[in-house]
Amino acid sequence: MIVTIITFILVFGILVLVHEYGHYYFAKRAGILVREFSIGMGPKLWWHRKNGTTYTIRLLPIGGYVRLAGNDDEDMDELRPGTPVTVQLNDSGKVVTINASNKAALFRGIPLQLVDCDLTDGLWIKGYVNGDEDQLKNYDVDHDAVIIERDGTHVQIAPRDVQFRSTSLSARMMTNFAGPMNNFILSLIVFVILGFTLSGVPTNSNRLGKVNSGSVAAKAGLVAGDRITKVGNATVNNWGELATKISSQPGKRVRLTYERNHHQHQVTVVPKTVHQGKEKVGQIGIIEEQKTGIKARLLFGWQQFIQAGTLIFSVLGSMFTHGFSLNDLGGPVAIYAGTSQATALGVNGVLNFLALLSINLGIVNLLPIPALDGGKLLLNIIEAIIRRPIPEKAEGVVTMIGFMLLLLLMILVTWNDIQRYFIH
């Protein structure tokens, strides 16, 4: 169990780190202030501030986020009129720290009862010193000033020139797309790594790589290098088709047509009946041809990536065409259960699970749902079509509705997962 928990934390951490780093990197590149880079949600466990960004690890493993300047109004929640704060000045008399937390104390701080502030354009703060209404003071605020939020997190203020909406539309679109893009890149890299960990990669060819000694195939005279072209009257073009045809006929006489040295031959075999769970399958003791070259391993990684993506799209498509069920979805609990199964398969099992989760996360995040990256990209596309910015309030309302729906869905999915894996 401990190994599973550690593996889950590592897999979850890698997925979130890679995804959010995509947003972070392209935001920084576009001159957008990244106020916070968080792995996890909820109460803060650890934080470190560097170059204007606060890096945090939070308690709940249900996601992560980057706080981009101008994409939230949390400053207004922290700094409402009447809020007691403490400000710290630099040598020029400008405010460099605004402390709204009772968990931190400022050296030589000036206590204020806040009256008003503008940390976006004018960069000033006004309040009553020591709460005395006869001592109303107005202070200029430094461009790079820091707010200490109620939970003790230090974040930089968000002046207009470093806000998300102040950059070009193309830069915003790239920033929104970069998270899923990073997940696709991670998935492809891991699948390629898997290709290099195998002794040989399957070719999906109908050519035999090995014939087990004493097997049904060996007794029938088949040898490595033979290419099976037909099973009965059905043509088989690859290993998948060949394996399916043979496994579906346990204990039955089957005529195989195969090619050896450019000549066609036929032989009749009776696949051995093997029990796999409650099913009976046929086996004749043949092994798929494998390759060991670098090109083959790279191609294997690419093919696994495409197959995984195709599978996820087909599942999403079936949800819309055949009806939606919570059992089609999985949250952190399902990921933990999957991690447990993957851990039992060893390092390769965990890597395969990581690659599948990563491409899954990338595709799901591109769905055109408000609050997801795909929803943000949809708003960007609408802005490009109408050739004017979407009003901030309208965008905020749409995003909030999407966020609340996603939160509700997350709660339902998590409860369903708990019932599925731990109660029933």
Image: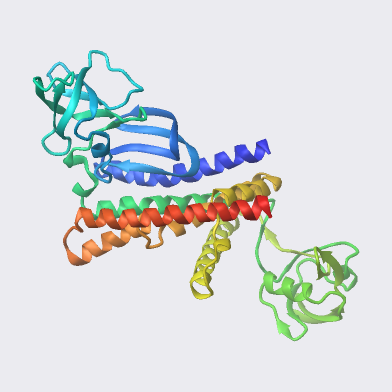
Return the residue nearer the eye: 330 or 114: 114
Return the residue nearer the eye: 286 or 251: 251
The answer to whether 122 appears left or right of 184 in the picture is left
Q: Residue at x 12, y 19 (%)?
A: 93
Q: Position of residue 73 (x, y in %)?
A: 25, 43
Say whether residue 194 is visible: no
Q: Quadrant of the C terminus?
A: bottom right
Say whether residue 296 is visible: yes
The answer to whether 150 appears left or right of 134 in the picture is right
Q: Residue at x 28, y 55 (%)?
A: 397
Q: Position of residue 153 (x, y in %)?
A: 35, 30
Q: Residue at x 31, y 30 (%)?
A: 149
Q: Residue furthest top?
A: 108
State the image quarter where residue 170 is shown: bottom left
State the image quarter where residue 74 is shown: top left
Q: Residue furthest front?
A: 133
Q: Residue at x 41, y 38 (%)?
A: 38
Q: Position of residue 59 (x, y in %)?
A: 49, 36
**Placement of 226 over or under 170, stated as above or below:** below
The answer to whether 395 appears left or right of 330 in the picture is left
Q: Position of residue 161 (x, y in %)?
A: 17, 41
Return the residue nearer the eye: 28 or 157: 157
**Placement of 147 over or under 76, stated as above or below:** above
